[in-house]
Structures are given as C-alpha cells and as structure tokens.
Amino acid sequence: MSTASISTTPPPEKVVPRREPKPGLILATIVTCQLMLVLDATIVNIALPKIRPALHFSEASQSWVLNAYTLAFGGLLLLGGRAGDILGRRRMFVSGVIVFTVASFIGGLAVDSGMLLASRALQGVGAAMAGPSMLALIITTFPEGAPRVKAMSLFTAVSSAGGSVGLLLGGMLTTWGSWRLVMYINVPIGAVAAIAAARLLNESPRQQGRFDVPGAITSVLGMSSLVFGFINASEHGWSDSVTLVAFVAAVVLLTAFVITESRVEFPVFPLRLLSDSTRARGYGTYVLIVGAMFSMFYFMPQFMQRVLGYSPMRAGLAFLPLTVTLFAVSRFVPKLLPRFGPRPLIAVGTALITGALFLLSRIHTDSGFTGALLVPFLMFGLGGAIAFSPIALNIMSGLSPRDSGAGSGLMQACQQIGAALGIAVLVTVSTSAEKGSHSSNPNVNFTHGLDTGLLVGSGIALAVFLISLTLKPKAPAAGAVPTPAPAVE
C-alpha cells in the first residue's frame, strides 16, 4: 500500500431507521438531476452568439464556455465515483447538486468572461460529484431484473436526449428572455432536487479503508490532460505543441494511475472491473457511440442557423421530433430486453444511428427540414432509444454494490471523453474538408465540411455496430442485488 495514503476510516456512525423506500420519487429525483447535468453541456451552444458580445469573449475564447464545464466534469469523474463509495453516495449526490446549483446562480450573475468561465468550471465540479452517485443509487435502489431495467431505461433516455433538450430549451430561453436564463434555470431545479434527495434517499454504507491519494492525483491530472488534449486539438489541430504535450502528459499520468491502482489495497478505480471483456468493450462502445452522436448535436444547429437561416428557437424546436421519439420508444425497451437480450437491440439501434448520420451527410445548401432532416432525426431518436439502455445495462449489470460508484464514474467519464474526442476528430475533419472546397459561396464550403464530418461520424457508429455483434450478456454478480442495511447519517 502506498505510504502517501490518508486514512479515511470513518468513526462509528449513528445508526438510524431507514426511510421507507419510494422508488418512483427517488428515480424522478435522479433523472431530473441527470437531465440538468447533461443538457448543460449543450444549452449554452445556442446562447453563445448572445454571450460573446455581452461578456466580451473573442472568437477563440468563446469555446471555453463549453470546454470549462467538460474539462472539470470529465477530469474529476473517477475521483467523484470513489468519493461516493467512501463518504456516502447520498452525501456526495446532494453536495454535488448544491455546488452545481450555486455555480449556476453565479454564472447567471457573471459580469465578465472570467466570472462565467469560473462558474462553468465549478458546475463541472458539482456534476462530477453528483454524476457517479446517480447510477450507483439506481443500482443499489432497484434490484436486478425488471425494476432495474425500467429505471436504467429512463435514465439512459434522459441522458441521450439531454443534448437535444438543451438545444431546445436554450433556444427558447435565449429568444424569449436573456442568455442568463440558461444559467438561472438550474437554480430552482437544483434546489428542489437537493431537498428531495436529502429527504428520500437512504445513505449508503461507507466503505472502510484508506483513500488512495496517488491514484486520486494521477486520475484527475491524467483525465484532465486527456480531455484538454481533445479540446485543444479541435481548436488548434493535432500537431499543435500544446495538444501533443497534453496527450503525452495524459499517457504518462494514466499509466502511473494504472500502476498505482494495481498496487494499492483501496484503489480509486478497481482494475478488476475491466477484467470482464464484455464490460471493457461496453465502455469502449460507449465512448465511440457518444462521439458519433455528438457529431449531429454539434453540426446540425450550426447548419440550421447558418445555412437555413433558422432563429435559435426554431433550430431548437427542430430537435423536438427526435426528443419525443427517443422518450416514447424508451418506454418499450424494458419489454424488449427480456425477450431479445441486449446484443440485438444494441445492433439495431446503432444501425439506425449509422443510417441517420449517413443520410445527414448527404444534405446540401438547398436542403429543407421536412425533405432532408426529419427522417434522419426520427431514425436518430429511435436508434438512441433502442441502443443506449442496453449498452448501459451491459456495463453496469453484475456490479457489486461496493463497485457501483467506481463503475458508474467510469461510464460517465466515457461519455465526457467520447464527446470531447468526437468533437475534436470531427471538427478537424470538417475544417480540413471545408478548406479544400473552393466554392465562392461560403455556405457551400461549410456544408461540404459538415457533410464530411457527419460521414466520418456514421463510420464511427458503424464500428460500434460491428463491435456490438461480439458483445455477450453478463450474469448478475454475487451481491449485485442490494440487501437492506441500516441507514447512516
């Protein structure tokens, strides 16, 4: 065991009567918070044209309104998952929601770019505290089988639809009010969610042991370097010296992290979770499919506003068919899983996403919404609804309660890495293709680059489809079904 470890063995705790479980209210609280965290990654996209002049951002620096959140969120997720296991998941969940809510309020008050960026980074810290505990709370609240499948289906539907909901809500708030509302909207939601969680949730038993300080440091710095490398690559290119330094640092730090985790008794992330080849491929699949899907959420709002001349609200409303389809179809996934298993559903869902992105890669400057965008949007929503819940269940199924925090932390880290990687790769591809187009019409050049990026996105989704054919469902692990235990405060 490392000598740099700090003892976190908790003192004897007061045992209190458990709250009577209210699964419906608990799930409503968790998915509401998840929606708040996920949509915050995109809700400011449409508000950026208003934020930039108001707070005097430059063309280059405005991207950090998005990046500051992604960097803090992605960099701290593994640590957040382990902290929930040690300190208690209810405590971390409620604390994270409070931090996120306070940060949102500060962001709404921002008087300059520095204040807004600091608030966005603080939002990412709160999200990293609360995020991993959400999936862990679902795992420990709902037993294996139909109850957990239904809960996970709703959670993943909210997670995959959050991007489009953010665009829709951002367009409405920006058009009808002020860009500050995209920050203030989180305040009442977060306050109610924090109060509800504190009243409804039983605290999880805290794990005994020592906190892995070297693992915490190398995981935070390594993950932050990796995410920053992808962010910088999307802005300055893959050969930029800062990008290369970030990736080298990420490799060194994450290698040190793996070595550390293999030697300590109480690691931040138990490497045994990756010894299951199906789960390991599930994590890889999640990174790739999120990266592919973000190509659509990143490119299409720009196309609709820049080429088709849509207002921010109209661009947001264009995602409504996708969002409605995703939520509507997600209700039937719990009935399909027991009958077909996860592999066929993942294959069908990723095939639909592949087809949707391919069709979108054929659009041109004269394309209209009904003729060119509606069908791919519906396919995209249908594919996301069918695929995401089985992918998540294949990753989380069989995890013991003691590993659920670390497992969910890595899953959400995969989502952030996938988004950063997808944007970095596809922006590089689209920018290169746009520069290679020599039309006198800049919209034609932009659309050519966009089409190329979406085509590469469809190729990534196709790779996920092929990987899905090799996945195998896992049997529940011993201890995977939670057993009642005294609540602690």
Image (tube, grey):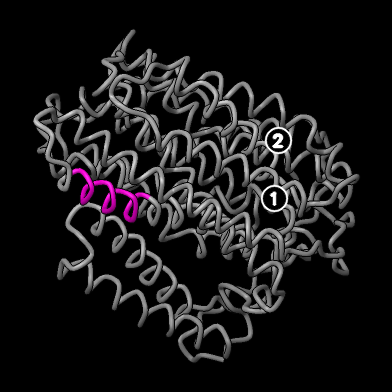
Discs 2, 1 touching: Cβ within 8 Å: no
- Give the extent of the magenta segment: 423-434
Question: Where is 24 relative to 350, above or below?
Answer: above
Residue 179: quadrant of the picture: top left
Look at mark 1 in the image and give the residue it sits on. 347
The structure residue drawn at horizontal position 31% and vertical position 39%, both measured from the top left corner, is 450
Describe the element under mark 2 as helix, strand or loop.
helix
Question: Where is 206 relative to 98, above or below?
Answer: below
**202 lies left or right of 209:** right
**415 lies left or right of 123:** right
The image's mark for residue 154 is 2
Q: CA distance from mark 2 to mark 1?
A: 20 Å
The structure residue drawn at horizontal position 76% and vertical position 52%, both measured from the top left corner, is 139
Residue 255: quadrant of the picture: bottom left
Tell me residue 477's x, y (percent).
85, 68
As drawn, the residue found furthest toward the top would be: 176
- Comes first in the chain, label 2 or label 1: 2
* 369 and 269: which is toward the camera: 369
The structure residue drawn at horizontal position 57% and vertical position 25%, both measured from the top left corner, is 323
Question: Looking at numbered disc 1 in the image, what kind of residue is underneath it?
Answer: Ala
Tell me residue 1's x, y (percent).
57, 91
Local crowd size for mark 2, using a 10 Å CA cut-off: few (<14), some (14–19), many (≥20): many
Describe the element under mark 1 as helix, strand or loop.
helix
Tell me residue 35's x, y (percent).
55, 33
